[in-house]
Image (tube, rainbow, N blue to C red):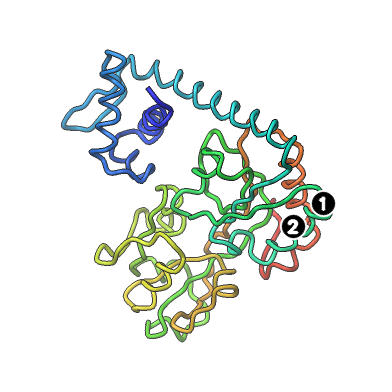
Amino acid sequence: MDLRQLRYLVAVADEGGIRRASRQLHLKQPSLSQALRQLEAELGVELIRRSARGAELSEAGAEFVEHAREILERASAARIAMRRHAEQRSCTLRVGLLAGIIAAGELTAPILERFHAVRPDVEVQLSDIGFFDQSAPLLSGEVDVALVRAPLIDRQIQLTPLATDPRLLLVGATHELAGVSRVNVEDILEERMVRVVAPDHFSAFWHADDYRGGPNTDSTIAPARTVADLQFAVATGRTIMIAASVTARVLPNDLLRPVQVSGLSPSLIAAARLGTDHRQMVRDFINAAADTAASQIHLLPGGELPA
């Protein structure tokens, strides 16, 4: 029995089935099923009942998954405790940035500068993290804190809201909306979106699924894992994408055109950490990020402080 198998079982419980869990974990379904069967064989009990209708936890599985959650949380706490010992030798904070500067847009550099002013004794190591799984680098200990974009749903991760950033539409230069400056959200719901490799709740938000009641993606185009993938797909003129407004400013592309969208809710920029990580330098970074957003929100065009 290993932590990987426990995380898989928890994902099945949280996502309500093996198929949805495999998407959330970015695993092929047969690989996930095999790992779970190995766990069942080792424990000698059936954890998951499988039928033509799908899969659900057995009575033993429902009991065991609570133990699995506790073990994963204890393992996370143990990693953090060992980091504290490591800090005595090397004071380094590893900061994850979602898609680089897109994470907090024009606030990113000021946040880092403010933290350096507060904690000049701490060396900051930056790491780019993908939207296909913002939580993984935190859960694995690859980064200590991250600037992310909501929604990020994981009971082990605590978010501190920093600012909201308008969402806009990006279309190809040859698309019929390329010459339009603004549209209503209702006007784009029939347009095909680029599929995003990300947890369902994240991709649903960026596909505007809640406005149309479900997805409307182009299955003929390969799913995108990076911003560059998204831009390339949209440049063909066959699909569109919803993006943070900062994308058009910091990653301009001559083959794309930005279109403002009325009635579309903004994106939330947040600082993320493990809920069990109470180290001072982590708290100092999050405080520096919040203070920077509060005092320099004007640097983010259209940005507002969260209510």
Indicate the amino acid at tag 1.
Pro
Label 1's element?
Answer: loop
Residue 245 appears in which quarter of the rendering?
A: bottom right
Q: Quadrant of residue 6?
A: top left
The label number, if any, that marks residue 145 in the structure image: none
Mark 2 or 1: the one toward you: 1
Where is residue 114? Give x, y as percent: 79, 56
> Residue, x 31% and y 34% (percent of image)?
17
Q: Is residue 80 left or right of residue 290?
A: left
Of residues 240 and 92, the one drawn nearer to the viewer in this rendering: 92
Disc 2 marks a residue whose amino acid type is Ala
Examine the rendered structure and indicate whether residue 276 appears above or below residue 96.
Answer: above
Q: Please state if 257 lies on the left or on the right of 238 as rendered.
A: right
Q: Residue at x 25, y 25 (%)?
A: 37
Q: Nearer the viewer, residue 57 or 37?
A: 37
Identify the residue position indicated by label 1 in the image.
Answer: 120
* Quadrant (top left/top right/bottom left/bottom right) for the N terminus: top left
Q: Position of residue 31 (x, y in %)?
A: 26, 38
Q: Residues within 10 Å of mark 2 (few under 14, many from 20)?
A: many
Disc with the residue nearer the chain's start (2 vs 1): 1
In three-dimensional space, the C-alpha distance between marks 2 and 1, rounded to whole angstroms, equals: 20 Å
Place of residue 307 in the rendered image (x, y in percent of width and height, measured from the top left): 69, 51
